[in-house]
Amino acid sequence: MTVLTLFLTVATLVSCSNHETTEDELTSVNSKTSKDQADEPIYGHQFYYASTEIEINRLKLQKTKLVAEFENGNKVVMEQIEKIQKDIKKLKRFNESLLFIKRPKGSKGPMPPKPCLIDDRSNCIPRQNLSPNTVIVLGEELIVTSVLIKNNKEESVDTSFQSIKDEYGQSALQLKTSLEGEGIMYTTLKSEAVGEITIPTPVVYE
C-alpha cells in the first residue's frame, strides 16, 4: 500500500505540473495572438509620399496619351494637357515638402521606393492594405481634413475617421469604412507648401 500510495502521489504531482505548464503556454499564445492582431502603424509622411508618386506616374501616362492625340490633330485635348501639367507640378511640390517635415517618433527607414506603398524587398506593391485596426500616424505637421473612399465601381462608400493619439502621444487617425475589397482612398490635407491638396491611394480593405 505504501508503494502504491507513493506512486499515486508522484503521478498526481506530475499531472498538476503538466497542467500548469499548459496554462502558461496558452497564456503566451493568447498574448502573441493579441499582438499579431494589431496592425503595424502607417506613417503618413511615407504613406502620402508613395501615394503621390503613384498619382504622378498615372498623370504622366495620361498626358502621354493626350499628347499623342493632340499630335494626331485633336486640339481639344490641349486644355486637359495643361491641367495635368499643373496637377503634376503641385504634386511634386507637395512631395518635396514631405522630405523636410519632422518625422514622427517610431518611423523607420527612408521614403519608400517610388512608387511602393508596400516594399518587401522583392516586390513593389502600389496599394495599401487597410483593416479596422489600421492607424495612420500624422505627427506634428500633417493635417488631414477629409477622407473619401470609392469602390472599384467608382461608388462612394461610407467612410469616417477618428482622430486619436499613438503610443507616443502623436496625432494619428483611425479609419472606419464599409469598403469591401479594392478601392481608392482620397485624402485631403492642408499643406503650407501647396495649400489644400487631395491625394488618391489605391487600397484593399480586409
Image: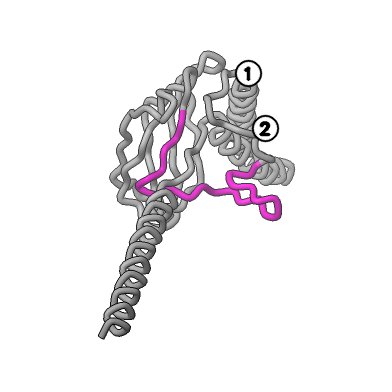
Mark sitting on residue 100 = 1
Image position of 34 with respect to 169: above or below: below
Indicate the quadrant where residue 116 lies. Answer: top right
Q: Position of residue 38 (x, y in %)?
A: 41, 47
Residue for badge 2? 110
Image position of 153 with respect to 161: above or below: below
Q: Nearer the viewer, mark 1 or mark 2?
A: 2
Q: Which residue is drawn at the image coordinates 44% and 46% (left, top)? A: 39
Farthest right residue?
71
Tell me the quadrant of the picture where the C terminus can be found. bottom left
Image position of 52 with respect to 18: above or below: above
**Residue type at the position of mark 2:** Pro
Taking depth in this image into account, of 122 and 203 the one nearest to the observer is 122
**Residue 69 belongs to the span the image colors magenta:** no
* Cα–Cα gap, marks 1 and 2: 12 Å
Along the horizontal axis of the image, is 64 left or right of 94?
right
**Residue type at the position of mark 1:** Phe
Mark sitting on residue 47 = none
Image position of 29 with respect to 162: above or below: below
Query: Magenta residues, as a range?
Result: 115-137
